[in-house]
Structure formats: C-alpha cells, structure tokens
Image (cartoon, grey):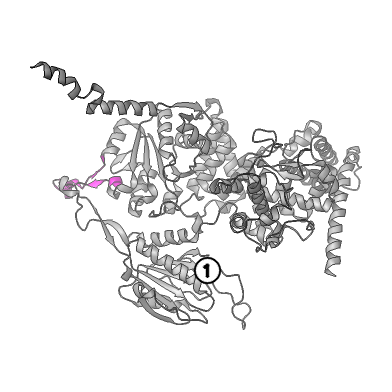
Amino acid sequence: MTVRTLLATPTQTPAPHESPASRLAVAGDLLALLRCTTTEPRPDEQLEALTLAVAADLPVLLWGEPGIGKTAALNQLADSLGLPLTTVIASVHEPSDFSGLPIVGEDPAVQGVPMAPPQWAVELVAAGRGLLFLDELSTATPAVQAALLRVVLERRVGSLQLPPGVRIVAAANPRASAADGWELSPPLANRFVHLYWVHDRDVVVRGLGGVWPRATLPSLDPDRLADAVALARRAVCGFLEARPTLIHRLPNSETRRGGAWPSPRSWEAALTLLAFGTAAGVSREVLALLVRGAVGDGPGLELLAHLDRMDLPNPEDLLAQPPRAELPERGDLRQAALEAVVAAVGARPEQARWDAAWTVLVRALETGAPDLLVAPATALAGLRRDTWEVPAAMERLADVIGIARTADRSVDRVRAAAKGARR
Amino acid sequence: MEKLLAARLHAVKVRPYLAAALFALHIVEDRAVPTMGVDAHWRCYVSPAFVARMSVEDLAGVWVHEVSHLLRDHHERGARYAREHEEHGAFQRLRRNIAADFEINDDIYGDGLPRPAGVVLPSRLRLSDGLLMEEYLRTASMKGLAGDLAWLDCGSGADGEPRPWELGPDGAQGLTRQQRDAVRFRVTEAIKGAPGEAPAGWRRWADEAFQPPQPWRQLLGAAIRSAAGAPGVGENHSYRRPSRRSASLPGVILPSLRRTPPRVCVVIDTSGSVSDAELGSALLEVAAIARAVGGRRDLVSVVSCDAAAGVAVPLCRAESLELVGGGGTDLRSGFATALRRGPGPDVIVALTDGQTPWPSERPPCRTVVGLFPRPARRVNENDEDYEPDGPPDWARVVTIG
C-alpha cells in the first residue's frame, strides 16, 4: 500500500452519512419527526357515536368521501378499545372469500364439501376479539354484497363463527363520489347503523400542524343500566304505538335507496342505541346521529321529537303544585307544556284543577314571554262551567289579553286593506 | 317589547304552520343591531328603535322573514357558498344576504302579511322568482342593488358571517343542531299536515328539507348500473371457467369473474309534450352510462315511440337519429317493440313524461323509467276524471330535470 493510496482513500469513499443505507436512515429520521404528533382532547360527536354503536355490537357503516380520515378514525377507535384491527377491502374480494371456498376432499359424497374460510377470518377467530373493518363496501359487486350479508348479520365466514368479541365496521363512498360504485341493496343497508363522516376544517389544519384531536370516549355507567333500558323501551314502544305505520317502510324514493330505513330490525337497533346512549350519558346530538343512522332521518327525527315531549313536565305534577311549576325555557316547548296542562284539565274538568291551571299560567307569565300564553289561556277560558267563579289569577293575565287584541286588530287591518285593494 | 310580541302573535295567526319555529326563537334586545337579525342558534336580535318605528303588521312580516332564514338553513348554506367560492368581505356578505332574501321574499307575503314598502324582490334585477339562494348568487352580481341596501342586515342566520353583537355558540339560550333540526322537522310536519294552507314554496321546502334532491344524472346512473349489474346480468362471478388463481391452490374450487355485457334498450317518448332539449340530454346520459357499465355500443338500442313504436335502432346510428313523432303517446307499443327483438334486452330504460298508458304486466327484464316532471293536468278533454296512471311499481323511477 503506497502513501498515495492511503491519502486518496478518504476522498474516494463517500462520507459515512452518504452510503445508501445511511441515506435511508436519514430519511427515516425525517419521517419519524414528521410522524411525531401529539393529541389534544376535543369533543367529537362522530367518534362518540361510532364508539357507542361499536360498544352496542351493532354493525356500523361509515359513509364518506375518499381520503377523509375514516381509516384514521378506526385506528384510533381500535386503540382506545384495545382491539386489534383487521381490514378487509370488500371490493377486491370474491363472494367465496366471505362464504367460504369449496374444497374437494377424498369422497365428497361421504364427507361433503367443506367451505374453507380465508386466512384473515381464521386469525380473527383465533384471537377471539378484534375490530373487523370492511372497506369499500359500495364498490363491491352485488354478489359480494350478498355474501357479506351473512358475515354482517350472522357473523359467519364460511364454516367459522366469529366470536362475540369481534365488532364489525364497514365504510363506503357516497354515490356522488363513487362513479363506478354499486348501490347498497336495501336488505344490507337495513343491517347497518349509517354514520355520515365529514371532516372538520379546524381539526384537519390543526392535525397537519402536529396536534390531532383525541376524543373522550363515552363510558357506560353501571348504575344507570336498568333505568336506561326502561327509558329506551318506554320511548320506542310509546312512539311506535302512536305511529304504527313507521314500523316497517321500505325506501320508496330513489334518493333514499342505500340508506337507513325503518323496520323491526332497525327499530331494535335504535332501542339498543338509545339505551347505550342513556347509560353513557351522551348528548342529544350523538343520540340523534345514532337514531337517524339506524332508522332513517324522518322516523329518527320523529322519535327524537317524541323524546323531547317525554322530557316535558308532567301536566298532573304542574297542576298539583302550581306555584312551584318549573316550565321549560324554550318558547315552543313551554307552549306545548301549557297546552298539555289545559288538555289535562279538559280531560277531567273540576273547578280546583281549573283554578290551578290559571295559577300555572300566571307562573308562566312571570317567567317568560306573554304571547305564548294566548292560545292556552283562550282554550282554558273556554273550559269554564257556569257555576265556576272567575279566579283572581285571571286578572293578572290582562296584559296577555292586551297583546292578543293588538295582534287581532293588526290582522284585521291587513285583511281590510287587502279587501279594499281587491275592490 | 309588547308590540314585538303582538307582531309575533299576528304572524302565528296568519301562518299557523310556522308557530313552533316562531316560538322557539329567543329574543335578545340590543341597541347595536341595525334592525332585526337572527343567528344560527335561533336567537333573534332586535333593535328597540326599529320596533318603535314599525307597525305591528310590518313587524309580523319581519318575524316570518327572519324565521324563514333559519328554517331554510341560510346560515349553513351561506357559509358553504363563501367557502366554496372564496368570497369574503362586506360586499360579498351583503350579496349573500340579498340572495337569501330573494329566495324568501317571493312567496312569504300576502294572505294576511302586508308586503313592506322597501322589500327586495328578484324582479328588481329582472330575475325570475322561485330560484334558490345559490342560483341567484351565481346569476346576478347585485352590484346595482348593493348601494341602496347597504343597511340590510339579517344577521349571521342569513349569510353565515358572525356579527359583533351575536352571542355565539357558547352564549345562553341557543339551540343545538339537534334541537334546530327537531324544530325544522316539526314545521315540515305542520306544513305537510295542512297542505292547503301553505304556499307552494313552503310545501316544496318541506318536501326537500330533510332530503335534498340529488342530481338526476347520478340517480339515473345508479338505477341503470344496478339494473344492468344485478345477478344474472352483466358482471358477475361464475364457476364456468376456473379462476386464474386456481393453479396455485389445488383441490380448491375458485370462481372467476366473468362479464356478460348487458343489452340496454332505450324507449323514448317522442310525443309532442316532451321537448327536444330534454330528450337530447337524457339520451346522451343514458348512452354514456350504458357504455360505462360495459355495454358495447352495438348492444344499446333506441326505440322512438309516440302512439305507435318505430323500429329499434342501434345506438351507433341513433346519434344521428331523428326522433320522429308528436301527438299522443302509447308506451305499450314501445315496450313491445323493445322486447320483440331477439335476444331480448337485459334492461329497458324508458324516457317519458308519464302521460301514457303503461304495460299491464311486468316485462321480463329490469325497467328504469326516467320521468320528465309535468304539472298535474287533465289530458283528455272529453273525460274530466281521466288522469294518467303513474309509472308502475315494478319500474325504478328517476325524476329528470
């Protein structure tokens, strides 16, 4: 070895950080820095709804544009529930991957043809628990969707039964963005709780800045379980007794196809979700997402309106203790409560109850807007019997009558002017 | 205050179906507000001076006007429009407010509510009535109006831009999204429950409030795709030939994906009641969709049909096809012609205005009907009770236009 070669070596071999392997290592460092993000707590209604539905063991279908963070949300959910996540992209599978592949043995006539399950199902069953994520559901062919019915409803893959610890979540792109998609058949749609996934601008911007949201996940309160079941049963049964036509209604218009629709199965899901939501103490917003996702927008909203009415104070309680009556703050609910009081008096007219109702009205006058009282007061005055004396409380509603007169006069003026114009 | 409440009662009396929404509003008195405005959380901000100088009946009109902004979700729609078109600033805010007012003002007044003197109507810009806020925004610059109406301010409920005096989402007495939906839902139920009372604009709103109409192209596409892709037609799995994966898995029987291109036959109603423009756009759409689902051009054929059906023409010639016809329609002969060809079609797409007799029994293939909507009217002068039947149950119906 000459001196020259010794001297030349350092300039010819690349510096240690330039060798191919170490270049990748530097790239790895950069990637690690990029991936190093933190989280901050932030209430997230979508995630709360998803967690509750998964906890209730109902299959969930997330609708959302591609790339909107459905998979990221599921990763977070799997982390927080401590479940391993198995992703199966439905559109690249064949029906036999879900119903089992027929395997011809020695003598099919004797042994039959077993339906072999795919590897992911075997692993899921071996683990005993996990989150099965069926992605791209709407781009699967109708035959694959038909095979998936069994996975979603009976939780069977081929000859394997998925253990109870496995939860199923699916995702689909809405028709508008899935140009080559198939729509979901109504039977398959009916088995899911449909959640519409949208991104929040602030969350995305802040997340790209390095801070992603961490939702506080709802947890069930063991002391409230019995009450929650009772409330959910009362709400759903009471509602369906009043609106029996909503028990089963196939989607009839083109726009509703592929979405949630009411049937005994989806009402059972709504009942379960109500009970879970109540036991977890989630907000009405989350309940609304879940119930509308189970039975569809119209019936879901009607059920929620029914829940609102169940929250109104009981008219008999108000009549029993009129001076301490607690009336709802919101005008429309307050009027509904007052009308219920008047209806209760009308159902069992007695002078004591009639007087008590006037006291409730005066109480309402003291705590809120007077124009709400016009309709209930007029109805209550109409219930009077000849022998009943006018209570002193009625005098205090003089202002209300004044407002009503002003309104009547103004309506009359407009009508008269319109008549004049026509002549 | 009393005057304001009397005005609300007036509004409830003449528009009973809006009662729930009017009473749900929470009134906030504030001298900073120019006139009367609403925010997205259903609070109504009122300037006492404004109330003092208005008459009760005009105030009633303002109530209905403001609550209409909320019911029609102008807050959300205005904010979305601003985001999508990157239009911010005072002039753009005013533009959205004016467009929202156009949408409302053309049908809320009259019948017990006097039309205020300075009200903004689409006719001031020579625009037609009955469009949506977004359509007004797209078609008109509103430059001419902006100077006169700079004072106009219906609050963030009308255009989605927050105001300094508003209490914001955390303020007291606001309605949450779910409560807002519940109130809007009760109003739609009230309107549907008393269909005679509400004007057409409100009835249309009630029908669409919770189901925004989807573009017919997507619906028609989905219907044809699902008809052409249903089991037995089009792409499907079969065991007729082994899958390419079979070689690696001896002993396992794998299905393979086979494609049988669907034959689509389009029956076109060429009676006088359907315009050429409507037909042209619908026909092009069907052809594009049929090609997208894998139908080869020679497998898509067209039958033009008025009282009698013409012959089925392959689509490759139909692009220069003259759609001959006029007068009455009998789609039954169109269906018969479509089915007479051998081999029969997998899917029949009928484009019609629906003023026709329909086949009495279900054809042996899937049927999609593209329906051009027509106002209900008598078509037979000799028989006043005659009304054409709607499309039959076995067809999937997509309303076009």
**Residue B36 percent coordinates (x, y):** 75, 45
Q: Residue furthest front?
A: A4
Q: Chain of mark 1?
A: B
Question: In the picture provided, is A408 more to the left or to the right than B124?
Answer: right
Label 1 amino acid? Answer: Phe
Q: Quadrant of the C terminus of chain A?
A: bottom right
- Identify whether B328 is placed above or below B110: below
Residue sitting nearer the eye, A350 or A145:
A145
Of residues B232 and A422, the one drawn nearer to the viewer in this rendering: A422
Q: Magenta stretch: residue B111 in it? A: no
Quarter of the image that includes the N terminus of chain A: top left
* Residue A416, placed above or below residue A262: below
Residue B249 showing in the rendered view: no
Residue A272 falls left or right of residue B247? right
Residue B29 figure quarter: top right
Q: Is residue A371 left or right of residue B78?
A: right
The answer to whether residue B233 is above or below residue B93 is below
Magenta residue check for A100:
yes
Q: Residue at x 53, y 27 (%)?
A: A221
Q: In the image, residue B306 lies at what x, y percent?
A: 47, 80
Horizontal and vertical percent for residue B149? 73, 51
Vertical comparison of A15 with B304: above or below: above
Which residue is identified by label 1?
Answer: B372
Q: Secondary structure at mark 1?
A: loop
The stretch in magenta equals: A97-118
Label 1 crowd (10 A; few <14 / some 14-19 / many >=20): many
Q: Number of marks in the image?
A: 1
